[in-house]
Image (tube, helix red, strand yellow):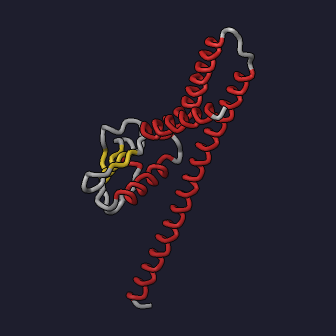
Amino acid sequence: MTLEEIINEIQKKKDLDLENLSRKFQDDQLKLRLDADRRIKKLLEDYEKKIANEMSMLERKEISEAELDSRTTVRKKYNDLMETGLARAIFYLEDLPQWKTYPEILESMVSMAKKRLGSGCTVKVSKTDLPKLSEHKGISIVASDEIAKGGLKAVSKDGFMELDLTTDAIMADMREKLSVRILESIGER
């Protein structure tokens, strides 16, 4: 075998290994997304059912002369259930940086930021998250004090577009979605 053939053979093996790693990463990334979506959907469905059951039980009570008191009770129960649902969802999300799969989730977030904002974007992560990330060509990954609890913020090269995937932003989005679902559930009654 000539030197050129050996070099070509090594190059082919490297390309094949990189292709296999890329495929595995994409498969793992898809599994991670699907699993997270499934867990969030199940959590929301469970609380929607619980809220519907509680509301149904409250509605079956006789309307007495203390109608105002019963409305206050319904509102309080609604608020308690909503807070319980939110507290549980927030508990899981606040613990996100301690998950074993967090580095993979973070890598997925960086890939999403690059895909949405394009090359040249800047990704900001916490100082503790920076070592968990591999190098991504075409984007800048920096440590930032504005990311306290985990996740990332990304800004396009021109500075006009921003993507906020911090755990605080995700929790706020979940809080809003859960509130809307609860209100829709109450409105259907």
Would you place residue 115 above or below residue 126 in this image?
A: below
Split into 4 quadrants, where in the image is the N terminus? Answer: bottom left
Does residue 60 appear to the left or right of 37 in the view shown? right
Asked if one can make out residue 95 in the rendered structure from this viewpoint, the answer is: no
Picture coordinates of residue 35, whole percent (x, y): 60, 50
Residue 116 shows in the view: yes
Asked where in the image residue 76 lies, by quadrant, the reply is top right
**Depth check, front residue: 105 or 38:** 38
Task: Give the mark count.
Answer: 0
47 vs 119: above or below: above
Q: Residue at x 44, y 79 (%)?
A: 10
Which residue is painted at 39% across and 54% down in the image? Answer: 113
Q: Nearer the viewer, residue 33 or 59?
A: 59
- Which residue is outermost to the left? 158
**Image coords of residue 98 (percent x, y):** 50, 39
Residue at 62 percent across and 31 percent down: it is 186
Q: Residue furthest bottom?
A: 2
Is 27 placed above or below 176 here? below
Residue 1's place in the image compared with 129, above or below, is: below
- Tell me: 33 left or right of 170: right
Q: What percent of the width, then of the height, locates residue 33?
A: 55, 52
Q: Residue at x 67, y 31 (%)?
A: 189
Q: Residue lying furthest front in this view? A: 65
**Where residue 158 sits: x, y (%)?**
24, 55
